[in-house]
Image: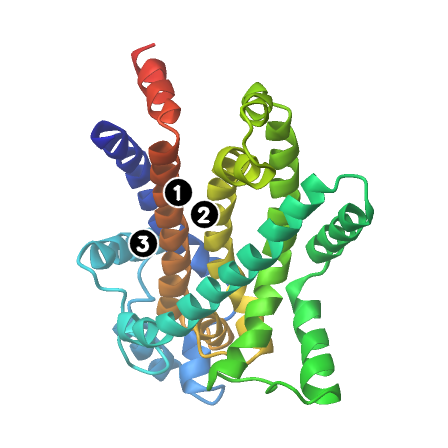
Amino acid sequence: MFFYCIYRVLHVIPVALGVVVAVALFIHLVPGDPVDTLLGEFATSQERVQLRERLGLHQPVGRQVLTYLEQVAHGDLGVSLIYNRPVAEMMGERLLPTLELAILAVLVALLLGIPMGILSALQKGRWIDTVSSAFSLVGVAMPTFWLGPMLVLLFSIYLGWLPVSERGEWTTYILPACTMGIALSAILNRMTRSSMLEHLKENYVRTARAKGCSEWSVIGKHVLRNAALPLVTVVGLQFGVLLTGAVITERVFDWPGVGSLMLEGLNNRDYPIVQGCVLLFSASYLLVNLLTDLVYAFVDPRIQLQTRSSRHG
């Protein structure tokens, strides 16, 4: 297990380096000039040149990318052009709300998707399976930028049960968490159903039933344990997607997270903020992907054996 961990970490390092370079390079393709945002349209040419030199924007793009790499290597994400505050400090203030929302969305997806998938597999071809399949289709098809406002209209404006937006007491978490979690629950529903149906046909299920094990014991101890292996990968990867997808949801619900901070940076042409947020999202995705691989290898040791055989081959 130790060598497999080292193997996966070594594969992540060049990808992370490529992400940093891409983030520093592509940010300059964003239209607009931060100098115009800071000084306004009535600034003189001399003031523009002075500010551009002070911010380092007069340097070639390649030099700016190298400077950013040096800063990131020292843990410095730069200073906001608009707010004149360290980007790392601003992101630290916004990180907790985004993590809370992503974790709650995963819980919503697990509580909805896995039980529905199990029931759908056990009741294949019946009305429960039909309803579950319809839910999966609708859940995947509905985009979050549409689902969020619809939930607000129904539960906040029409019924008056839940607050409209902003982060506060526990009721404010329900609508944004459901907005992000429904799509994932639909994916988990279909994955659980297909995996359960595949393992229900295996010989060990017939053997367990022949030994007199109860149906719930067969399902819980044997089928579900083996069927859960693909779900580990899906949940891990989708958690990274939820962090990046929180940008739209945070905008809809006026949520004070990293996603809304990145949108503010884009609107203000604040390069350091956008770079820091994109880098955080990318790093979180790589980290979750790495942890998912390690958990999967721990649950299924055959992954480690395959890795060793491919490396020696």
What residue type is disc 3 on? Val
Query: 86 and 67: which one is in front?
Result: 86
Q: Which residue is mark 2?
A: 236
The residue that disc 1 covers is 292
Please state which amino acid type lies under the numbered disc 2. Answer: Gly
SS type, badge 3: helix
Q: Quadrant of the C terminus?
A: top left
Q: Measuring 22% from the left and 59% from the top, which residue is drawn there? A: 71
Q: Residues within 10 Å of mark 1 (few under 14, many from 20)?
A: some
Mark 3 or mark 1, earlier in chain:
3
Residue type at numbered disc 1: Thr
**Quadrant of the image for the N terminus?**
top left
Q: CA distance from mark 3 to mark 1?
A: 31 Å
Q: Are marks 1 and 2 in contact (CB under 8 Å)?
A: yes
- Residue 65: assigned label: 3
Which residue extends farthest left?
74
Q: CA distance from mark 1 to mark 2?
A: 5 Å
Residue 301, placed above or below residue 148? above
* Residue at image location 71% in from the left, 69% down from the top: 146
Q: Earlier in the sequence, mark 1 or mark 2?
A: 2
